[in-house]
Amino acid sequence: MPNKSGAEQPEISGSTQKSQRTKITKSSDDNEKKSLAKKLKDSEICIPIVYGNIAFWLGKKASEYQSHRWTVYVRGATNEDLGVVVKRAVFQLHSSFNNPTRVIEKPPFELSECGWGEFEIAITLHFHSDVGEKPLHLYHHLKLYPEEESGPLSTKKPVVIESYDEIVVSEPSEALFARVQNHPAVIVPRLPADFTLPPVPLEDVDSKNRVDTKDNPLNQWFTNFSEADELLKLAAARQQVQAHIARLRRQLTLVDGQHQQLKAPSDIS
Amino acid sequence: MDAKDILGLPKNLPIQEKKSKPPKESQRKPDGISREVYALTGGLAPLMPAIDVNQLKRKAQSENEKITWQWLPFTNSARKDNLQLYHWVRVVNGNPPTGDYSFAKCNKSADIIKYTDEEYEKYLTDPAWTKEETDQLFDLCERFNLRFIAVADRFPSTKTVEELKDRYYSVSRAILIARAPSPGDVSAHPLVKDVYNATQDTERKRALNLLLSHTKHQERRDVEASANLVLPVLSDTGTLGADKPITTADTVNPSTNSEFPSSTTTPVSETASVVASLRMLRVYLRTYSLEQMVQAASSSAGLRTIKRVEQTLQDLGVNLKPKVPTKAVCAEHLELRKEILTLLNLQKQLQYKEAEGSSLRDGTFTETPGTPPKQQSVRAVDLDRTFTPDSLSTGGERFGKREQKRKGPGRLAEAPSSPAQSKRPRKYKASD
């Protein structure tokens, strides 16, 4: 299973790759380990995530206090399983809910509830120990009602609001790297082809319990986040700005030249 | 008062006068100190008296002894010449004070070890020093009581202060050790215990000099580097790569070649420190890292500039916060922001230059450098002397005085400028 390349550039510069090759020809385990450690020192692995909520209006079944059924979640950006790095997710709901602190111990990291109000939900992601000790916090404002006043609410079409972000693990440990390098949810830096990492034991225990997140019924509503649009726009903007800068620089040198001319005649007495 | 008489109104005078007096009196209330001194305190008495006035006068009275002051001769044991000087002495009941001159105990000198010639031959020979030089050194040290700076000045051959010190201390040390019955006896002696390290001393002085001669620029760099030291403490991961923040900041700084000397060195070192702090965090969100980098890059910009950057982004149709913040998108976004900052800086530069240009031509200052708009930049060059009457009037009254001093509109006049009128130094010389 290849790494997600996308628009990701390899973390390692060409020069380190060369030095790695010469080290490999020595064919000693120690050297390989050292060079991997060094490589991982300046690299990062990245897990693209999307978090947000889906809300269905309950229509006839709606009551005053339960007008919507909503699900708040954190998912892999391409619906891959986040359990590879996330140990558990804690959703902190509004205090009016029973047990407002909801802990989800295994993927899919989502939580469904019924309610009427929109409020901020604090999502805390706890990671496996080889990823990091400190949890990360995300904040999502629950949205039940659509942006536009599009007339009557529909029970069929939900309100979806999602945010894209990426979890970055800088300088991952070798163990983590080995564990995740082939996982579809994770983007890892590309290593030179003749680099062999120790084989990772298959995680049999998990595979039984693992819910295939690709089968999530809500998938049909999920947004597909593509960086292409944004990249294009940014590139165009940069071009504009650079052209502007070049023009200003020319003007500046022109004005400078004029100043020089003006200053010269002061010697005339 | 007469009016009241005329009107036949009752005379309220006594009451009024009384009212006016008390407030006045409270202002004039010195008690034991003169009015002027009281006024120095602001017209208010201090809450706590600084000195207890009662104590001052009582001390002498309680002693019931006769105190006189007499002009008497005295000798100083610190002097070798038996010079007799006179001074005022407080005599109690006819008895002059006894004891040595009170400052005689200050005449301290260092014990300089004297070596014999044999000792020199045995222990103290050194390739870099002749016996003569060493003798001279010791003589000077005694005369000047180990003030090595003075010794160095008077030493016949040129030796540095550190070399002299080195020689002196090593000789003294060698002698002490040689004379001691056993090494243990003198091991506590400061000369033996602490060895003088000449190279270290030289280095230390060189470093101090360097520090002293730092320009403001370098001082700022030092402050940034020490600010980077704070970052490792923030994260509570197990590892502390404490050396990282400092080295990255240092390596980044020398390599900045900036057009705008003051502004761009700080943002570059800031981004380096942000990168280091992110590494310390280990696990973080991409949006967080972008936020930090954006902050670092615009650290030297004021709030207004930042607003302008954001306005420009909006005009370009770019989201202020990327909707899909991948690594590539964030990098591009950051670069775009930096480029916009550069753009705004250049615009400002151009405006200044144009303002300068028009002041060069007219011989007057423009008060507000920002006013000449960009579009006029090229056209301004073509404007001629005919423009001068207008520029004079724009200054209004402020230029009125200058008008009299001007020698003619066609020349670049001398500029007796007050700093308040122009914020930039004038670059041209006066023609005569």
Image (cartoon, coloured by chain):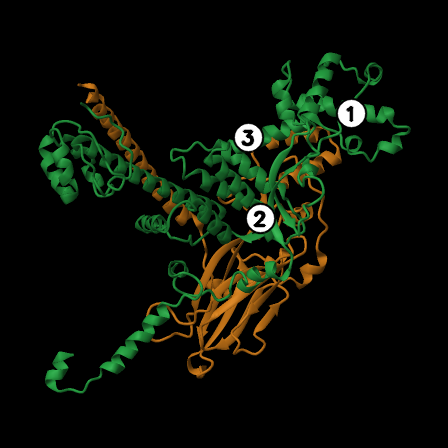
Residue with the most extreme right position: B181
Residue pointed to by mark 1: B113
**Residue A236, relative to residue A95: is it above or below?**
above
**Residue B342, relative to residue A99: is it above or below?**
above
| First of labels 2, 1 by sequence position | 1
Q: Amino acid at mark 3?
A: Leu
**Side of B189 where B374 appears, left or right:** left
**Chain A color in figure:** orange
Provide residue B394's location: percent of width, then percent of height.
14, 42
Task: Please state which of residues B153 and B429 is positioned toward the viewer in this rendering.
Answer: B153
SS type, badge 2: loop
Q: Nearer the viewer, mark 2 or mark 1?
A: 1
Q: Nearer the viewer, mark 3 or mark 1?
A: 1
Residue pointed to by mark 3: B210
Residue pointed to by mark 2: B230
| First of labels 3, 2 by sequence position | 3
Q: Amino acid at mark 1?
A: Ile
Q: Amino acid at mark 2?
A: Val
Provide residue B15's location: percent of width, then percent of height.
27, 82
**Residue at image point 46% right, 56% down:** A224
**Chain B color in figure:** green
Local crowd at mark 1 within 10 Å, few (<14), some, or many (≥20)? some
Q: Report, in whole angstroms, how far the alpha carbon at label 2 lies from the one at label 1.
A: 50 Å
Residue with the most extreme front position: B94
Q: Which mark is residue A196?
A: none
**Residue at image point 41% right, 53% down:** B321
